[in-house]
Image: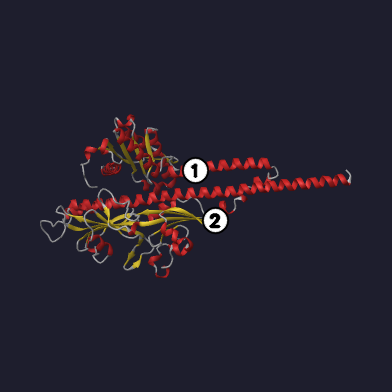
Amino acid sequence: MTSSDLKFFCTRFCLLFSLLICLSFLGFTYHAKQELGTVKSNLKVEQKALLEGKKNYIEWVIGSVVKETALLANLLGQYQIYQPPHSGESPHNDDSLERISKALVSMSQQKEIYDQIRFLDIEGNEVVRVNFSQGQAQLVPQAQLQNKAHRYYFQNAMALEHNQIYISPLDLNMEHGEIESPHKPTIRMAAPVYDENGTKRGIVVINYLANYLMEGLRLFNLNSGTNYMLINRDGYFLFNDLNPELEFAFMFHNKKEETIYQQFPELAEKIINIHSGQVESEKGIMTIESVGAIDKINPYCFQGIHISNNDTTAWKLVSYADFNARIDVQHPIAQHDMLITVGFALCLLLALCLATYQLRLHKDDQRIHYLAHYDSLTDLYNRGAFHAKSATAVKKAAKDNTPLCLIFIDMDDFKSINDTYGHQAGDKALRHVADAIKATFGDNAVVGRIGGDEFAVLLNGAQHLAHAQQPADQLLERIRQPLEVETNTAIQVSTSIGGHFCEGTCCEGADLIHHADTAMYQAKQSGKNCVVIMECTDFPRGATH
């Protein structure tokens, strides 16, 4: 090859190589920007779904405690423990006091989420108190009961009218004027107790251990690089996943300024004004979702029971995805080494980029949908999806005037399985129950896992509704089958199954859930490991729950 040919070849090669490099670089840069937009879009959808799940979880937990507080106030009034006996100097009915004390101890032991359950008379004297400590519910001796007339929750509760409930702020429990250590986040709920003549005779107070609420919030977290927070109406952190030292700063003199507004001053106005939405800045994406009371609307009111104060339950869930802490946002180009390798072939590069883009978008959508609607351990509907599906079925049944049956399945002594055989065995037990439910009802029912060890089934097909008791009994037998949790070690899973069969106007959503829960509770009261199916005639019309 002559020097002229070599010069021509080198010139053309350099020009073509430069052109291909430029085209490849332009194509890759375009795709990288599109990928960054996709990552941000998926991030917004993910955070929106996660916060909605957290919101539903919080409102379900607090709503359940509110209902149990109202139920206890009603029961205490019926037991009439405030009535004087026929003889003796005790100001309270001894037999009723003994019965209600045993019931409260049993409730505390089964729930394991109440630090204290108390009944106080109108002078603030504790009549009965049950403490839950180190996994054991204990009835406090009479000699150790105290007068709480000076405490704010007693004074607020005594000012309540009939069918009102007071909810205290979520704060750290204090003993003898000092914050208890280790910290114990607590919410106190109180309701007045009235006698048959409508005279106020005292209050019932439940101290809910909010640690369980915080642990539940952590279960919803998916990716690192995002901080999840729960704030009160003043902007103080009640939960801060990445910076727990900032939690409950309002209770410490040296932390009074540690609010979310101090952490994000440029977003403070939007945090205050946005009830539900997202804000994207140069540094990250913030998602905001209001929880509990919004203005005068309080989701914890039910069946004529009203919350006396909205300020203590006006919370906001906030997530902040810091772009600098998320690799998928900060370095999208670094994730495409293969595209860089084949960057010389422009057409192949573009085809590969488009296919990768579409596939990733599809997989992300599928994953977000799965996480938002299904429980990953059992592959059943999660709480939110179950309620949505069942609400649709209830509306259709009401329109078509067809019957329904809602069944609650609660695993008995599930904690002891975890404690004795480990959490892996506990997961096997949960899957065992889920498999039994699916084998019994198949695709002819709406089935979901609505809590840690709680399941729900909504029967709306003629196949099972003809005799609702029969499939429930079959389910119990399937669950009773031995389950091997370890080599040569098998256990029998025990469940309490309660259901409510209804038709027509009796099938209202709130009553349906409450009656099914009552049936399940009756199954537990009947010795557990049994089935109780109740009908509308088992519940009086117009009863207050």
Whether residue 185 is visible: yes
441 shown above or below 320: above
Circle 2 packing at 10 Å, graded few (<14), some (14-19), many (20+), is some
The amino acid type of the residue labelled 2 equals Phe
Question: Spatial distance from mark 2 to mark 1, Cα to Cα?
Answer: 21 Å
Label 1 sits on what residue type?
A: Arg
Locate residue 478, reporting x and y percent.
Answer: 36, 35
Q: Secondary structure at mark 1?
A: helix
- Kindly identify which residue carries mark 1: 367
Return the disc, 2 or 1, that comes first in the chain's sequence. Answer: 2
What numbered label is drawn on residue 537? none
Residue 443: image location, x then y, percent: 40, 33
Q: Position of residue 535 (x, y in %)?
A: 25, 37
- What is the secondary structure assignment of the residue under circle 2? helix
Residue 429 left/right relative to 159: right
- Say if mark 2 contacts mark 1, CB within 8 Å: no
Q: Which mark is residue 323?
A: 2
